[in-house]
């Protein structure tokens, strides 16, 4: 399979060229257009229990799309619903990638997507919920965001503070803790930040330049209440 991320500056899509028999899986409703040699089917990756776990625990769809070039080489275009970035990540099997909800877009079949539990405090306070997605295996992974995806590369022992609404993905070997944005609760709340995530390197944390929750709040502020 070869691919290209088109229009990366704004509203990107991925154009994949598959040889006959090749396939990839994507989030539900990701396909935009495809060759007539391609087939698209709904699949519950990992079976019924895994599908239910994704739906009930992380809020993701129970089903993935499986896109297969059955009748010869084919091309497929896929994208995501939010105005934002798409980034390709190559996983070599030595670590997994933890992905916030709605961050998974597509991957090759060497990668498994499962639901991962966070501890109680992170689930309550991070805004990501108790469960996130974890991508493991070898292959190409496409993640999506609201806004552009920006990497923060941390050296060993280096720490960085990130607003939890801007998190997209991070290596599963990295650890983070929740803390107040300022020294006191009143200052933290009045700053508009509240709680933030403190990551410690080494590793690369992927963030999005826009916050979906902030945009939702802005929309509510300009829509007349009934």
Image: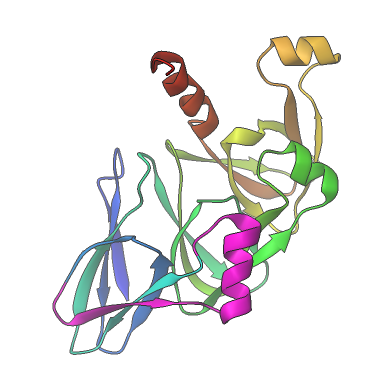
Instruction: Write down the region rendered in magenta.
Output: 35-61
Please report the residue visible at 82 percent of the width from the left and 51 percent of the height from the top: 119
The quadrant of the image that shows the N terminus is bottom left
Residue 107 lies in the magenta-colored region? no
Residue 52 lies in the magenta-colored region? yes
Up-down: is 141 above or below 124? below
| Residue 87 position within the rendered picture, expressed as x and y whole percent measured from the top left | 43, 52
Q: Is residue 223 visible?
A: yes
The quadrant of the image that shows the C terminus is top left
Q: How is the image coloured?
A: rainbow
Tell me where residue 155 sits by quadrant.
top right
| Residue 42 position within the rendered picture, expressed as x and y whole percent measured from the top left | 38, 75
Tell me where residue 72 sits by quadrant.
bottom left
Q: Is residue 136 visible?
A: no
Please report the residue visible at 46 percent of the width from the left and 26 percent of the height from the top: 215
Up-down: is 48 above or below 206? below
Up-down: is 44 above or below 127? below
Front-most of 151 and 185? 185
Does 189 sit left or right of 165 as displayed?
Answer: right
| Residue 169 position within the rendered picture, expressed as x and y whole percent measured from the top left | 59, 50
Please report the residue visible at 56 percent of the width from the left and 68 percent of the height from the top: 91
Does 36 sit left or right of 122 as displayed?
Answer: left
| Residue 94 position within the rendered picture, expressed as x and y whole percent measured from the top left | 67, 71
Please report the residue visible at 38 percent of the width from the left and 42 percent of the height from the top: 82
């Amino acid at each position: 399979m070869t691919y290209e991320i088109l229009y990366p500056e704004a509203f990107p899509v991925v154009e994949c060229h598959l040889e006959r028999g090749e396939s990839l899986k994507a989030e539900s409703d990701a396909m935009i257009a495809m060759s007539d040699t391609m087939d698209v089917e709904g699949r519950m990756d990992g079976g019924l229990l895994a599908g239910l776990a994704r739906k009930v625990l992380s809020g993701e769809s129970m089903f993935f799309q499986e896109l297969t070039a059955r009748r010869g080489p084919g091309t497929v275009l896929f994208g995501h619903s939010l105005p934002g970035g798409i980034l390709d990540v190559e996983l070599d099997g030595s670590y997994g990638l933890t992905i916030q909800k709605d961050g998974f877009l597509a991957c090759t079949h060497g990668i498994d997507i499962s639901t991962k539990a966070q501890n109680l405090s992170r689930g309550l306070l991070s805004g990501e919920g108790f469960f996130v997605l974890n991508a493991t295996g070898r292959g190409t992974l496409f993640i999506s965001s609201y806004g552009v995806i920006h990497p923060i590369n941390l050296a060993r022992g280096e720490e960085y503070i990130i607003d939890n609404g801007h998190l997209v993905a991070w290596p599963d070997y990295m650890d983070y803790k929740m803390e107040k944005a300022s020294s006191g609760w009143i200052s933290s709340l009045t700053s508009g930040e509240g709680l933030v995530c403190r990551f410690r390197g080494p590793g690369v944390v992927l963030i999005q330049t826009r916050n979906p929750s902030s945009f939702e709040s802005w929309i509510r502020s300009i829509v007349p209440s009934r």
